Image: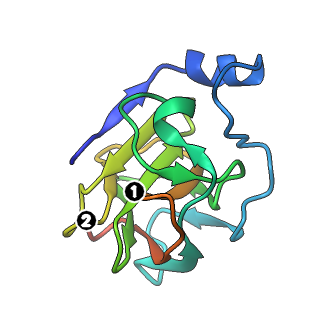
Amino acid sequence: MKAVIATVAAVAALAAAGSAAAQDWRLPANYGAVTLYAGFTPDPFTVNVTSGGPIDASASVSSSCRGWISNAPDFELTYSAGSLPLAISVNSASDTTLVINGPDGLWYCDDDGGDGLNPSLRWDSPPSGTYDIWVGSYQRANYSATLSISELYSY
């Protein structure tokens, strides 16, 4: 099922106040961080991750989100935008999802927006700043996956 949502920053504020949201974008990312500038090479930038976690994104972020995710982000992207679009995608042999807290404070989610059962989110005019990225699993399991960040390719 394809689901792309943006939930107002109030969700993030409620998370800090102790609501149902359990994601903590302030924690160090499980698989590291990178700073990329417009026109970066190589494109796509990729990192191997393991999807999933103990938290149901539909209960903790938004009912429109899918997948099981960890508390800490899986990866942190600090991005300086130019004139190109930005696409963040996952490639896996299993059913994965994406949950992203963008630099605008909004939450973005996708399930199956890429090839097959893979998620992908695209910003035609991406804001500069930090993107905290969670790679989820549609089922409560962990899978090998590759996170891709690109200005040239939309998956």
Few, some or many residues within 10 Å of mark 1 (<14, 14–19, 20+) = many
Which image quadrant is residue 76 in?
Answer: bottom right
Q: x, y (%) of residue 75?
A: 63, 62
- Give the label, 2 or 1, closer to the camera: 1
Sequence order check: which comes first, mark 2 or mark 1?
2
Q: Amino acid at mark 2?
A: Leu
Q: Which residue is mark 2?
A: 117
Marks 2/1 in contact by CB < 8 Å: the verdict is yes
All told, the count of numbered labels is 2
Residue beneath the point at 54% across and 70% down: 142
Q: x, y (%) of residue 92?
A: 37, 77
From the viewer's perspective, tell me whether residue 113 is left or right of residue 13: left
The disc label shown at residue 138, or none: 1
Residue beneath the point at 57% across and 65% down: 36
Foreground residue, 10 or 137? 137
Q: Amino acid at mark 1?
A: Tyr
Residue beneath the point at 49% across and 79% down: 46
Residue beneath the point at 34% across and 52% down: 121
Secondary element under disc 2, as helix, strand or loop, is loop
Q: Vertically, is 42 above or below 108?
A: below
Q: Vertically, is 15 above or below 36?
A: above
In this rendering, does residue 84 appear at all?
no
Q: Vertically, is 7 above or below 117?
A: above
Foreground residue, 75 or 94? 94
